[in-house]
Image (cartoon, rainbow, N blue to C red):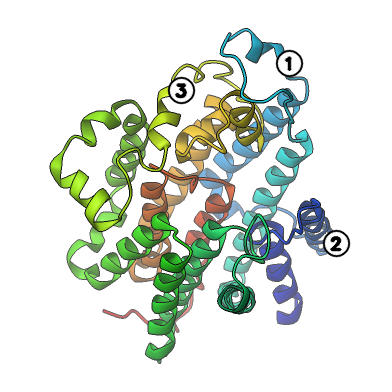
Amino acid sequence: MSDRFLKILCLLLFHTSFVYLDDGSGIGRVIQAICLGTFMTLLFVKRKLKLSPRYKTVNKFLVLYCVGLLLVSFYSKNWDIKALDQLNMGAAKDTLRISSYTLGVMISLSVFTAFALVEYLTTINKTHILFDVFFKTLLFYLFISDIQFFLWGAANDDGYLVGNKFSLSYMHILCYVIYERISRTKVEINKILKLFLIFLAFLISILTGCTTALVGMFAIIQLFLFENKIGKIVYNGKVYLGVLSVGVLFMFFYNYVLEIPVIQKIIVDWLHEDLTLTGRTTIYDTLSMFMFASPLWGFGVGNAHWILAYLFGYANAQNGVVNLYIEEGLVGTILYLGVFISIFRYAKRHEIKNISFPILAYILVFFFLGLVEITIDNKLLIIMSFLLANDNNKNIICQK
């Protein structure tokens, strides 16, 4: 394939999963579906809609996850609302809207296709095209969204061209991390551009009031600044396990954590938030009664929002792992983590640490943010595939 054709594929991948262009009518999902259909068709025509044998263990977990996601989606198709009524919890709304099972099917296909492209680009030493296209496309959308924000503020209920304040702020973080990843393979680095990306990420997080993005960007910067001293934690699997475990346990034991004076000072004096974590503690209290309503298969992709809004009037679980569990059940959650573990182990064995560090740092921080926000999702899973993206040639520059 020509470089131009590969750039088109990378552009389609971006629009399949990383941006949601919607005016409130639902057209955003249609755009993503069209991009996915075109993406898969082009790969199929070129006979590249397949996984590389180089990543056998990763691909086994990936296929299991994608199949599991399909099963979860078809299971949710026949899901009966009476299962909720039997909980005798009442309801905050009169009607329940359920996402179509086709959303789960689309996400399953998009994850599989993303891995197929990344693995193919790696085999032909063209992964630099992936990062270059993603970085430039992120800059394009962020430029428009930031101009809109600074001139007119929020445009609609979702706020900005690329979505709400979380989408905008997280996209800024991803843009910076992608540039860090690119800079690891360059002889010359544009330090002014790097500083500008950092400044803009912090500024947007502050001005939009996105505290989680502000904390996340601060954590990422600390990892980069002290990479030689503390950077090794991103290569320690126990750290990820600990962060995910704390994220789940925090929902049940938050009251003990919030009684610690240092934690109170950070939340109230530094972050200027209240000790209910803007209502999250109330959500945690009520969710414990709901956790075993559909434990194995969950309620289907995209349904956590609708079901929690129906029962409690909440937008989501405000916890990444729990929200994933509600939608994809125990089956989907375990397989999701299985994909990450297999990629993580591969990256530790085969990747140059300096090259994989930015993506691992991003994943670790977003696992941490999952403690209070929905940052553990299928978009993050596709970003995990970037750990496989490495041009195995002699031009890679290892910077200290």
Position above or below: 44 against 353: above
- Residue 157 falls left or right of residue 339: right
Q: Residue 88: horizontal and vertical position, in percent?
A: 58, 8
Residue type, label 1? Asp
Q: Are marks 1 and 2 in contact (CB under 8 Å)?
A: no
Work out which quarter of the rendered image holds the N terminus and state it: bottom right
Residue type, label 3? Thr
Which residue position is annotated with label 1? 80
* Residue located at (61% from left, 62% from top): 118
* Residue nearest the viewer, comparing 95 with 347: 95
Residue 286: assigned label: 3
Of callouts 1 and 3, the N-terminal one: 1
- Within 10 Å of disc 1 (Cα), the crowding (few <14, some 14-19, many 20+) is few
* Residue 77 figure quarter: top right
* Residue located at (36% from left, 56% from top): 348
Residue 137: assigned label: none
Choose mark 3 or mark 2, whichever is in front: 3
Q: CA distance from mark 3 to mark 2?
A: 50 Å
- The tally of labels here is 3
Q: Report helix, strand or loop for mark 3.
A: helix
The answer to whether residue 274 shows anywhere in this view is yes
Q: Residue 399: horizontal and vertical position, in percent?
A: 31, 80
Q: Residue 43: horizontal and vertical position, in percent?
A: 78, 61
The answer to whether residue 187 shows anywhere in this view is no
Q: Report helix, strand or loop for mark 2.
A: helix
Position above or below: 218 against 187: above
